[in-house]
Each structure stands twice: as structure tokens, then as C-alpha cells.
């Protein structure tokens, strides 16, 4: 029975230069491409067609488009750096704030206990005009921010003003990766396993490809209004420690 391939199949990658790292499944997979680019050098005389061809570099590259976002992708397949549990970086976007009508003219943010905090702007609700941060002694249209307490202080001229405040804080859950500037040549090595199964008249046919050692050269994150984000992950294969590159298996 003839074998066909339909759909995107399954793509999984696992870091191999460090032990006991969790694999990453490219979830909600949209597209996968594997390219085998064989460089040929031609020997040509006075005639148009080459009299000999010499095969040079074989470049094996891949690209995956998918929807699942997980820390394992960033730390084990691209950066090669460690993440920690907790300290999820969050931003409060447009928290509604009201300056008191009498002294003290302060506002304490809702997440004041989730330090460290950082101010990212204050705006008047009515006009959208942005207030200016100052170190101390704010006048009308200015404010100060205490990063350790989450307290905004305003001028008497802004009494009863309705505002939107933007700031970042550290939540207790999630995962966090702080990227430190590494030496060149230290990116992670991982293996890639691809499988597609297609039934033809009730008979399942498989095609599997395992690339033994790969490195990634591109991770693209694109966010579009009214669309789901579909990251793109590019990688290139090389020989592993035993000199082997890939294993290809087909039912037929």
C-alpha cells in the first residue's frame, strides 16, 4: 500500500548536552519543514554541460511554526540558560487610580506587596495626557513613585484626578529566565524527532526522522491583533559525538 503524509505530524526536541532536561513538544504545530541542501561543484569545459560534479557540504536545516509557549523552549533549546520557578514578571496595564481630594495626595498600587516594582507611566483618564515622573516635590502634572512601597505621590493641583497607572511587579507563580551575556559558542545542543502517521485505506503509514544533534539559529515571536501568536523556530543539524547525523525510517 502506497504511503502518503498528511498534516503536520509530531515534532519533539530534547536537549542533549546537559542531562535530565525535559523535552519540548511543539504543541499545536502549524508547519514543519526539513531541508537537505546538497552543495554541488561542477567541472565545466568549453561545453555547456558539466563533465563532472563534486558534492560538497550537505546542509540540513529545519523550521517549525507552532502555538505552544513554554519555558522549556527558551532555556533548553535556544538560550541554554537556567530558569527559576516563581518571580513571574507582570505588568499592570491601566490600573484605575484616583488622587484623593485632600492631603495626602497619594495612591498605593493594588500589587504593592509584590516587589520589586517599577513605574511604567501615569496618564489622565480624561485626556490621555501622560504625567511626568520627578525625583521629589511634584507639581501639577508630575508625580513621584516609591518602588519599595508602591506609593505614587501627586501634587495638590491634581487632587481628585482620575488616572491610569502602569507598573511592573513580581508574581509568585510561573517561571523566569534572566539572560546573562554568555560567551560565544555556548548555545545548547538538542536532538529533534519528527513523526507523521497517515492512514491509507485503513492501513497506517509512518515516516520518522531523527536529527541527532542540532542548534537553533532563530526564534521569532510575532504578536498580531485578533490573531494567535505563532512562533517560528529555526534549527540546523550537525554530526553528533559518534559522527552520526540522522536516522530516517519509512513504512514503505
Image (cartoon, rainbow, N blue to C red):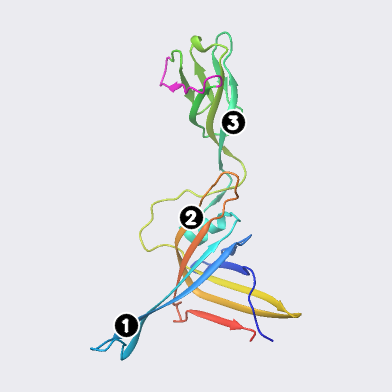
- Per the image, the residue denoted by label 1 is 41
The secondary element bearing badge 3 is classed as loop
Give residue 73's position: percent from left, percent from top. 54, 58
The secondary element bearing badge 2 is classed as strand
- Per the image, the residue denoted by label 2 is 220
Distance between the Cα atoms at labels 2 and 1? Answer: 33 Å
Let me know if residue 30 appears in the view: yes
Q: Which quadrant of the view contains residue 160?
A: top right
Dot placed on the residue nearer the N-terminal end, 3 or 1: 1
Give residue 20's position: percent from left, percent from top. 57, 65
User: Magenta stretch containing residue 130, yes or no?
Assistant: yes
Which residue is at 51% across, 58% downward?
A: 232
Q: Which quadrant of the view contains residue 22?
A: bottom right
The quarter of the image holding the N terminus is bottom right
| Dominant SS type (magenta) | loop
Disc 2 crowd rating (10 Å Cα; few below 14, some 14-19, many 20+) is few
- Per the image, the residue denoted by label 3 is 113
The quarter of the image holding the C terminus is bottom right
Distance between the Cα atoms at labels 3 and 2? Answer: 34 Å
Q: In this rendering, is residue 117 above or below 246?
A: above
Horizontal side, residue 226 vs residue 137: left or right: right
Distance between the Cα atoms at labels 3 and 1? Answer: 66 Å
Of all residues, the one furthest to the bottom in this rendering is 51
Dot placed on the residue nearer the N-terminal end, 3 or 2: 3
Let me know if residue 81 appears in the view: no
Give whichever of 212, 51 is nearer the camera.
51
Q: Which quadrant of the view contains residue 134?
A: top left
Disc 3 crowd rating (10 Å Cα; few below 14, some 14-19, many 20+) is some
Residue interval drawn in magenta: 125-137
Amino acid at each position: 500500500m502506497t504511503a502518503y503524509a498528511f498534516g503536520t505530524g509530531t515534532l519533539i526536541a530534547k536537549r542533549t548536552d546537559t542531562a535530565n532536561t525535559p523535552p519540548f513538544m511543539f504543541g499545536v504545530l502549524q508547519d514543519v519543514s526539513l531541508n537537505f541542501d546538497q552543495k554541488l561543484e561542477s567541472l565545466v569545459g568549453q561545453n555547456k554541460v558539466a563533465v563532472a560534479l563534486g558534492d560538497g557540504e550537505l546542509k540540513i536545516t529545519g523550521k517549525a511554526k507552532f502555538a505552544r509557549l513554554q519555558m522549556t523552549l527558551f532555556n533548553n533549546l535556544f538560550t541554554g540558560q537556567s530558569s527559576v520557578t516563581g518571580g513571574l514578571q507582570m505588568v499592570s496595564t491601566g490600573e484605575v487610580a484616583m488622587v484623593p481630594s485632600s492631603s495626602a495626595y497619594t495612591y498605593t498600587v493594588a500589587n504593592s506587596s509584590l516587589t520589586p516594582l517599577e513605574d511604567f507611566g501615569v496618564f489622565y483618564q480624561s485626556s490621555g495626557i501622560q504625567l511626568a515622573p520627578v525625583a521629589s516635590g511634584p507639581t501639577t502634572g508630575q508625580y513621584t513613585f516609591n518602588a519599595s512601597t508602591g506609593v505614587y505621590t501627586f501634587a495638590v493641583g491634581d487632587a481628585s484626578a482620575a488616572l491610569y497607572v502602569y507598573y511592573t511587579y513580581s508574581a509568585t507563580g510561573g517561571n523566569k529566565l534572566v539572560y546573562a551575556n554568555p560567551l560565544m559558542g555556548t548555545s545548547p545542543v538538542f536532538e529533534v524527532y519528527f513523526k507523521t502517521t497517515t492512514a491509507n485505506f485503513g492501513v497506517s503509514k509512518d515516516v520518522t526522522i531523527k536529527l541527532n544533534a542540532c542548534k537553533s539559529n532563530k526564534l521569532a515571536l510575532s504578536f498580531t491583533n485578533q490573531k494567535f501568536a505563532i512562533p517560528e523556530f529555526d534549527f540546523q543539524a550537525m554530526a553528533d559525538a559518534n559522527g552520526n547525523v540522522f536516522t530516517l525510517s519509512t513504512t514503505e
